[in-house]
Image (cartoon, rainbow, N blue to C red):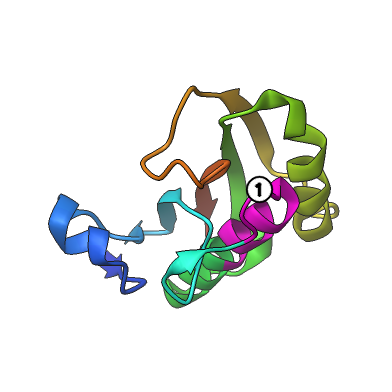
Amino acid sequence: MRQLVSSGSPFEGEIGFSRAVRSGNRIEVSGTAPIRDGKTAGIGDAYEQTKACLEIIVKAVEAAGGKPSDIIRTRIFLTDMSVWKQAAKAHGEIFGDIRPASSFIGTNALINPEWLVEIEASAEIVE
């Protein structure tokens, strides 16, 4: 079984990707930017941007039939590693009890210069 999940992002068709793909019990969520209502959320605020990314990720996992506790891995890309604690705080609010494997990765740029953070996630549904 292969299920594609769309978030409605205009980049999905242009780039040729899905917000998430479920294959069997596995769900992979694409790099997720901090976008709310078509605009960058929390400009200049890594905490708010991380929250926005994680909200989109949780919604995608749920649309694929999973739940937040099925998320087993997150990868947080930051354009400024000095804000990692802000991103970690938001991550901990969602995943404090779930505790997926996680990485914080520094990068020099993301597609939109307003984005301080982009996040990928992997989930596995245990039935």
Asked if residue 78 is positioned above or below residue 39 in the image, the reply reads above
Q: Quadrant of the C terminus?
A: bottom right
Q: Mainly helix, strand or loop, the magenta region?
A: helix
Residue drawn at x 36%, y 41% is: 111
Q: Quadrant of the N terminus?
A: bottom left
**Residue 55, position in %: x, y?**
61, 67
- Dot 1 crowding, Cα within 10 Å, few <14, some 14–19, many 20+: few
Q: Which residue is mark 1?
A: 44
Horizontally, is 49 left or right of 65 in the view?
Answer: right
Q: Which residues are magenta?
A: 42-55
**Residue 100, position in %: x, y?**
69, 44
Residue drawn at x 56%, y 30% is: 79
Depth check, front residue: 10 or 120: 10
**Residue 81, position in %: x, y?**
68, 25
Q: Quadrant of residue 95?
A: bottom right
Residue drawn at x 76%, y 59% is: 94
Depth check, front residue: 68 or 109: 109
Q: Does residue 120 belong to the magenta stretch?
A: no
Which kind of residue does numbered mark 1 sit on?
Answer: Gly
